[in-house]
Amino acid sequence: MSETAPTTFAEIRALLDQLPGPDLAAGRAAAAREAQLTKPAGALGRLEDLAQWLATWQGRHPPRIERPYAAVFAGNHGVAARGVSAYPAEVTKQMVRNFIDGGAAVNQLCVLVDADLRVYELALDEPTHDFTERPAMEEEDCARAIAYGMIAVEEGIDLLCLGEMGIGNTTSAAALCHALFGGAAADWAGRGTGIDDARLIHKTALIETAVAKHRLAMTDPLEILRYLGGFELAAILGAIMAARLARTPVVLDGYACTAAAAVLHALDGHALDHCVVAHMSVEPGHARLLERIGQRPILDLGMRLGEASGAVLAVPLLKAACACHSGMASFADAGVSGPG
Amino acid sequence: MSETAPTTFAEIRALLDQLPGPDLAAGRAAAAREAQLTKPAGALGRLEDLAQWLATWQGRHPPRIERPYAAVFAGNHGVAARGVSAYPAEVTKQMVRNFIDGGAAVNQLCVLVDADLRVYELALDEPTHDFTERPAMEEEDCARAIAYGMIAVEEGIDLLCLGEMGIGNTTSAAALCHALFGGAAADWAGRGTGIDDARLIHKTALIETAVAKHRLAMTDPLEILRYLGGFELAAILGAIMAARLARTPVVLDGYACTAAAAVLHALDGHALDHCVVAHMSVEPGHARLLERIGQRPILDLGMRLGEASGAVLAVPLLKAACACHSGMASFADAGVSGPG
């Protein structure tokens, strides 16, 4: 991937035009098989939709999940120095250590669902600029982070779970959503890792002021990302694009991850068609955001951890969709009577 | 279990008084450990609650799921002859064959989550009586079905998933709910395997008339079960009781399974404390029923298949709760800073 890695926004925009569409034939094959399986039509609900979606975006029938992969991008945020998080910024690096040592939630979940996990660090000693003062990133740095995210899509994987770690990044995510979708800053700001009322008011005011300050300069979604985003969020956007090019369906995690994806959706309303959102975060902006990008989460378990935990938790359900689709007997094979 | 198997309702009522309560010490140990793990407090949402619930009802800390077990009870219903289902009654037996041959959805799901599956047939050639005419079961037959369900709780299992197969049994389930909770028959009747409007009207009217006809005779929840239930639903009630006695947490499936459980709840408001409902069925009475018995489903995937499919699908989420709870590092061990 590195020989074609974009280094400017113009190159990234050009890449958008190359994103492949759905494999409708594979999707039709899935729908045709589904109708023959020993169950009332539609009785497996969302599992049936997911099997068809996987076929459509893996470009093969039957769909299979044999090599799921979880990529967690970690970055630091200048705005974290403003006291927007319950945790100090050094926790980003400490948690990366914890991922490497196997002690985090996502490690346990990856073992359980038999997914490979890789953590991608984005210059943790060099946080983005504080977006309340100036653009968080230079164009070149932002484009490089996107390109870095593109390398996460390894050869041979058949499902990509995306997640992030970055103290301060729900502030960045809320700012992205406020700039992309309007409304009030309070619609998008939440408690993140668990801030109290006073900090939430402070966080909301910072977002409101920063977005208003940069409003005129942010002339398109990539500029919004550059002004308000973070390296790990830019990398997620890159990983989503690369997955599309590789015909690898994507599972998005919670609020920060989906906010990064929303930048891509704003650039191209079909750019997330190969993505599914794993779960509804407790972060109140997430429900609003999902509505804006037309996504329905698979799970709703009151989670708000990030680090791809929700995305990996959805893997067994996607595997279940494949297993039922591929393994069930047909009415004819099993000698089961149809409706009559 | 057979030497103590109840054969009368009086014996079943007596058994209710012997159901053990929660192991609060195990639950407290789980809560204490949860607070030390490397995540913001509460960030794993429902997974944290489920880990504590599993500890409380397995009576051990940490909770473990190493031998999940799925029991599917199959029975036939006299009321099926009234044209309340989209499928003919012989499908019950054909689907049991399909379970044994490994071709049904639940077979694929059990392989995926590494759960043992066993199908329990309840006299498929002798359906219950048509409850629109007379009580569906004699007391002795109903008590025997409950006792049969009790044997499903094998030694050494640590999670019991319950489900059913029985053409006509959403009609029975709706009648049970209507009798237990009141309201209108239309509140509880749904499309089951997929009946059209005309059949739904017919099904609803049958339920309304039958419940009104037997109202005065149904003097307690076990009598409601006897008049309106089915053998497989009685067996589910027995399995739930036996699991409680064996300190085995239970995962309930969809509408018919939960309706059977609701009979037990009506007998004793704490009798389902060791049970969790796996998913929200499309069957419209299910949401109402869950509200009445104070249960919140884990999944909501638009499913309506029965055969324990939803219950088994929830197993990976319960395993995930255990895996995170047991495997994660503490803040102290990982050298991660707390909130500050």
Image (cartoon, coloured by chain):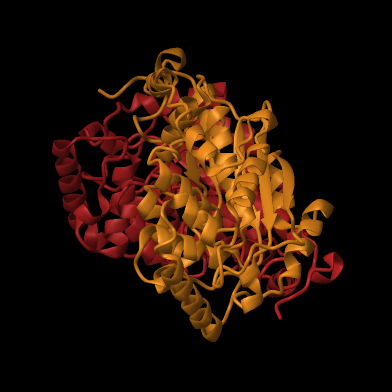
Chain colours: A orange, B red
- Give percent across and percent down for residue A80: 64, 72
Residue A208 falls in image quadrant = bottom left
Q: Nearer the viewer, residue B187 or A200?
A: A200
Identify the residue at the far bottom of this view: A198
Residue A37 falls in image quadrant = top left
Q: Is residue B137 above or below residue A133?
A: above
Q: How many marks?
A: 0
- Looking at the image, residue A335 sits to the left or right of residue A239; the answer is left
> In this orientation, does residue A205 appear?
yes
Q: Is residue A208 above or below residue B218?
A: below
Q: Nearer the viewer, residue B60 or A203?
A: A203
> In this orientation, does residue B6 appear?
no
The residue drawn where x is 53% and y is 26% is A58
- Give percent across and percent down for residue A73: 67, 51
- Looking at the image, residue B160 sits to the left or right of residue A21; the answer is right
Q: Quadrant of the C terminus of chain B?
A: bottom right
- Looking at the image, residue B57 sits to the left or right of residue A217; the answer is right
- Give percent across and percent down for residue A79: 61, 71
Q: Is residue A214 above or below residue B75?
A: below
- Give percent across and percent down for residue A28: 38, 20
The residue drawn where x is 21% and y is 54% is B185
